[in-house]
Image (cartoon, rainbow, N blue to C red):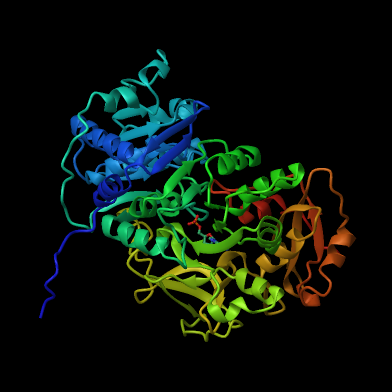
């Protein structure tokens, strides 16, 4: 017997319709490339996203065509999120931090038909345009007056003139909820990048899941600052969850330094902010240097890389801000787990609570996970056994765009490439990327553990632990360290700092001080590049 409820496809257009109707006055505040603060609201975003829809129709782009963006977090980018996907076209967010050659490769692979870019990326666009033959329409996200006369890009449109000429009414088309809505290329640390192609259905289900109280806990009472870029897995899906809940959105634009982010948090009464650890490092540095406090910030979602304990403590103890450690990946839309305590853990002593908070957290409903050994056998949830982490669920990838890389699934599960433990309460903890795991004398050493201890030293700004070939132990860990400006620590002092914190055999064999650790386009440490830089390095005593 079938249920007798209405059957409506889950479409992204319904999100913006809802936000307009029920949260029209909800604010959308953006620091613009132009330098000023721009104020809009959900009603205005909805109105202008319909103008985008009409403008795209005017270009004659059929459903399924890719419309790329090269843009910071801001209201125009938000309008494109809804205008492009709402009409059945596919929003392709490009990462401007990629090398131009890589961008060209991605644009051609995606066969983007239009590309909308912030004016700060004009030089980049000029450098790549001639090598992107599929792109027929170039749109600069500015008003007509800001458009350079001699851009060198044929037919360059100004976004404001382009959409301004359009009516602000339209009827969003209805189509299969499994249609593609947006796409995002993975960082591609091995081989060419591959794209995750999200659907309307996966995006809406993720929007529900991500907004849950034990996930990002978004509501109409929140003022949310996504520092995580809209070109990195759709800003962790926040734009969609925000439209569903009607929260205020505050966009930082290109200004991600500690001072700018702090000023925005205070001025816009931000209650929740989301980003990768490197951004929060800059923010905490600014607070500490100026003896500043937050007056409204309640929680930060931190993910993308492991959040060091020193950061959790600083936010919690010094600033009264709860850290929600989260884990996910491009292939997972991205949210998989968030670390929020269960009732029984609230009464644990502070150091025990911190141990739980350091974990990447519990699966949100919609994500199923398990850990397996090398033979694919499931491992127990005892908090000690570690193995390959596999996931499945309606917002997790089934195959890459154009079938690149073949079938990624193992018996219906997606192998994340992460190595993890899961405890009896269901809290998952990443010990490593499988390719970064250090094997010493047959035992695994977690590079994240080694890094976290170094990061807790007051003189350390950033630390990366990598394995070095060793004739007896196979591999031994070393820690590569960037010191904080003006701070001092010696190799011996740092190695002594490990005493009593981890087993003796897990303590790194050496400390290498460097000016900078290579970071990828999404702010993650590039250990492959680091290992290449260290190719002439020899372990002490070898
Ligand atoms: P990306 O697809 O670029 O977002 O990268 C996803 C990968 O980032 C994951 O597979 C993890 O290796 C890593 N990652 C994401 N969040 C965390 C976290 N909270 N702790 C440790 N690693 C993380």
Residue shown at 76%/74% (left/top)?
Answer: 502
Count the labels in the image: 0
Q: Nearer the viewer, residue 513 or 325?
A: 325
Residue shown at 66%/65% (left/top)?
Answer: 448
* Quadrant of the frame with the N terminus: bottom left
Q: Nearer the viewer, residue 460 or 282?
A: 282
- Eyeballing the image, is 433 above or below 515? below
Q: Nearer the viewer, residue 191 or 78?
A: 78
Q: Position of residue 466 (x, y in %)?
A: 69, 62
Question: Is residue 520 left or right of 513 when viewed as pictured?
Answer: left
Q: Position of residue 19 (x, y in %)?
A: 31, 48
Residue shown at 37%/70% (left/top)?
Answer: 366
Question: Is residue 15 left or right of 149 when viewed as pictured?
Answer: left
In the figure, residue 92 lies in which quadrant? Answer: top left
In the figure, residue 135 lies in which quadrant? Answer: top left
Residue 151 seen in the current view: no
């Amino acid at each position: 017997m079938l249920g007798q409820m209405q059957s409506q496809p889950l479409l992204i257009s319904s999100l913006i319709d809802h936000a307009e109707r029920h949260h029209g006055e909800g604010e959308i505040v953006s620091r613009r490339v132009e330098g000023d603060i721009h104020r809009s609201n959900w009603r205005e975003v909805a109105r202008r996203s319909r103008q985008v829809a009409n403008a795209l129709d005017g270009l004659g782009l059929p459903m399924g065509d890719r419309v790329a963006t090269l843009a910071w977090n801001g209201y125009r980018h938000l309008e494109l999120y809804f205008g492009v996907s709402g009409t059945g076209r596919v929003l392709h967010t490009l990462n401007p931090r990629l090398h131009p050659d890589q961008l060209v490769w991605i644009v051609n692979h995606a066969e983007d038909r239009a590309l909308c870019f912030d004016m700060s990326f004009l030089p980049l666009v000029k450098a790549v345009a001639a090598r992107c033959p599929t792109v027929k329409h170039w749109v600069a996200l500015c008003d007509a007056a800001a458009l350079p006369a001699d851009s060198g890009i044929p037919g360059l449109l100004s976004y404001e003139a382009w959409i301004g000429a359009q009516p602000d009414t339209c009827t969003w088309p209805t189509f299969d909820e499994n249609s593609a809505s947006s796409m995002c290329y993975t960082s591609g640390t091995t081989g060419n990048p591959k794209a995750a192609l999200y659907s309307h259905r996966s995006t809406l289900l993720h929007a529900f899941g991500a907004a849950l109280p034990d996930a990002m806990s978004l509501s109409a009472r929140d003022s949310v600052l996504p520092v995580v870029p809209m070109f990195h897995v759709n800003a962790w899906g926040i734009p969609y969850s925000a439209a569903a809940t009607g929260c205020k959105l505050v966009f930082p634009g290109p200004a991600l330094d500690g001072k700018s982010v702090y000023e925005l948090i205070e001025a816009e009464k931000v209650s929740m902010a989301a980003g990768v650890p490197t951004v929060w490092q800059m923010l905490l540095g600014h607070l500490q240097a100026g003896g500043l406090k937050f007056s409204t910030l309640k929680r930060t979602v931190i993910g993308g890389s492991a959040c060091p304990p020193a950061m959790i403590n600083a936010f919690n103890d010094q600033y009264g801000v709860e850290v929600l450690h989260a884990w996910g990946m491009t292939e997972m839309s991205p949210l998989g787990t968030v670390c929020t305590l269960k009732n029984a853990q609230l009464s644990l002593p502070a150091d025990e609570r911190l141990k739980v908070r350091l974990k990447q957290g519990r699966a949100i409903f919609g994500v199923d996970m398990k850990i397996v050994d090398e033979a694919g056998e499931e491992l127990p949830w005892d908090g000690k056994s570690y193995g390959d982490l596999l996931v499945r669920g309606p917002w997790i990838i089934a195959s890459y765009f154009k079938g690149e890389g073949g079938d990624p699934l193992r018996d219906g599960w997606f192998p994340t490439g992460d190595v993890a433990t899961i405890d009896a309460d269901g809290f998952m903890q990443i010990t490593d990327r499988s390719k970064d795991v250090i094997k010493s004398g047959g035992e695994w050493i977690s590079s994240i553990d080694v890094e976290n201890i170094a990061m807790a030293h007051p003189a350390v700004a950033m630390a990366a632990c990598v394995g070095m070939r060793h004739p007896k132990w196979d591999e031994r860990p070393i820690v590569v360290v960037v010191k904080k400006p003006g701070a001092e620590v010696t190799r011996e002092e740092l190695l002594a700092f490990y005493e009593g914190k981890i087993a003796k055999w897990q303590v790194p064999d050496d400390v290498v001080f460097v000016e900078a650790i290579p970071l990828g386009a999404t702010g993650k440490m590039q250990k492959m590049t680091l290992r290449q830089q260290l190719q002439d390095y020899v372990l002490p005593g070898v």
